[in-house]
Amino acid sequence: MVLSRSVEYAMRIMAFLALYSSGESVRPMRAKDIAPQIDIPSFYISKILRRMVEAGLLKGSRGHGGGFTLARPAKRIRFIDIFEAIEGPIATRRCVFGLSLCSNSAPCVLHHRWSELNDAFQQWARKTSLADVQADVAANGRIPLPNLSKD
C-alpha cells in the first residue's frame, strides 16, 4: 500500500506526539518545534495539524504555552483514524483500474490481489493504535527519534 506524503507526515506527527505525551505531565508542542524533530517541512506541518484538530485527534491551543496535544488517550487513536483524517474514508472496493463494474463476480485482472493487500492494510490500520507505538518504544527501551526531550 502506497501512502500519500500527507498521510506519512500525519503518522509521524501523531507517533511523535504519542511518544512525547507518554510521561507524567504533558505540555503542548508547537508546530515549529515538532517539524525539525521528525523532518517535516515547516510550511507543510500546519496544514496537517489543522486536519488532525478538525478530526478530533489533536487539541490545539494558541498563545504563550500553546501548541498541540493528543485529544484522547493514545489507545483510542488508531492509524485508520489518522489515515481518514487526511484522505477521507477508505474506498474499500475501488477498482485499481478504475472500472465501475469490478467485483468478486466480475473482477478486473488485479482484483483479487489488490483486495488482499487492501484488506490487510485495513485490518492493520483498524487494530493498531498510538498506544502500540508507545508500547513498542517502551519494550525497546529507547525512542528512535532525534532530540526527543521534554525540556
Image (tube, rainbow, N blue to C red):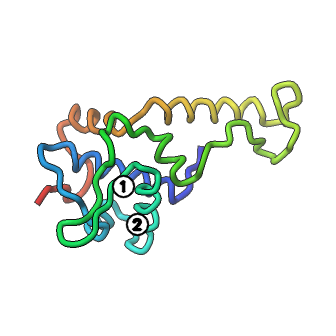
- Secondary structure of the residue carrying tag 2 is helix
Label 2 close to label 1 by CB (< 8 Å):
yes
**Which residue was labeled with disc 2?**
45
Q: Position of residue 151 (x, y in %)?
A: 10, 60
CA neighbours of label 1 inside 10 A, class few (<14), some (14 to 19), many (20+) = many
| Res 92 → quadrant | top right
Q: Is residue 126 above or below residue 12?
A: above
Q: Indicate the amino acid at tag 1.
A: Ile
Q: Measure the alpha-carbon separation of dots 2 and 1.
A: 8 Å
- Determine the residue positioned at 31% across, 67% down: 31
Residue 20 versus residue 49 in the image, above or below:
above
Of labels 2 and 1, earlier in sequence is 1
Image quadrant assignment for residue 89: top right
Question: Along the horizontal axis of the image, is 132 left or right of 137?
Answer: right
Answer left or right for 81 relative to 16.
right
Q: Amino acid at mark 2?
A: Ile
Dot 2 alpha-carbon crowd within 10 angstroms: few under 14, some 14 to 19, many 20 or more: some
- Say which residue label 1 marks: 13
Q: Where, by quadrant of the figure, is residue 90 drawn?
A: top right
Query: Image point 28% across, 69% down: which residue?
Result: 62
